[in-house]
Image (spheres, grey):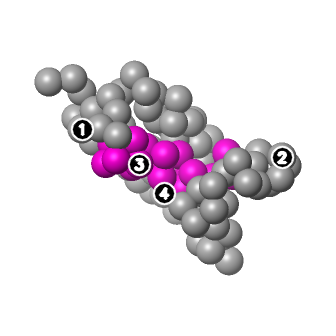
């Protein structure tokens, strides 16, 4: 239910500029949008961190928001929150490694 709209609104299939304004705003909330932009920047253009930091920051903010939501909830969601925050740190580390100027 979440995967297909996320992929369709990420800019992977259709350019984000062709989407209507409100749908484009929804697309900016999805992590796939920023991941696709980072991947294209690294793979196709060889972009550095300076060009990609807005997308990295958006992914970190999304991970922190979801991690905070899971931390507020009780039960096993604390494990999910910790895993999500760790995944955000690993993603940030990988992006820094691949985009750091040599």
The mark found on residue 21 in the picture is 2
- Give percent across and percent down for residue 43: 31, 48
Secondary structure category for the residue under label 1: helix
Which residue is denoted by mark 3 in the rendering?
40
Tag 4 and tag 2, C-beta contact below 8 Å: no
Q: How far apart are labels 1 and 2 at the CA level?
A: 32 Å
Q: Is residue 24 left or right of residue 87?
A: right
Label 4 neighbour load within 10 Å: few <14, some 14-19, many 20+:
some
Instruction: Say which label, 3 or 1, has the lower sequence index.
Output: 3
Q: Nearer the viewer, residue 40 or 65?
A: 40
Q: Viewer-nearest of labels 3 and 4?
A: 3
- Determine the main secondary structure of the stretch shown in magenta: helix
**For numbered disc 2, what is the local secondary structure?**
helix
In which quadrant of the rendered image does the C terminus lie?
A: top left
Viewer-proximal residue among 34 and 40: 40
Q: Can you identify the residue that label 1 sits on? A: 98
Q: Look at 34% across and 33% down and name the residue there.
A: 47
Please give the name of the residue rendered at 75% of the width and 49% of the height, measured from the top-left corner: 24
């Amino acid at each position: 239910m979440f995967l297909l709209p996320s992929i369709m609104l990420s800019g992977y299939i259709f350019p984000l500029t062709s989407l209507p304004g409100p749908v484009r705003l929804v697309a900016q909330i999805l992590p796939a949008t920023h991941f696709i932009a980072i991947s294209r920047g690294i793979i196709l253009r060889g972009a550095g961190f300076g060009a990609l930091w807005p997308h990295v920051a958006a992914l970190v903010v999304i991970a922190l928001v979801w991690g905070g939501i899971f931390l507020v909830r009780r039960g096993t969601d604390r494990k999910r929150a910790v895993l999500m925050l760790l995944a955000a740190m690993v993603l940030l580390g990988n992006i820094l490694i691949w985009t750091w100027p040599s």
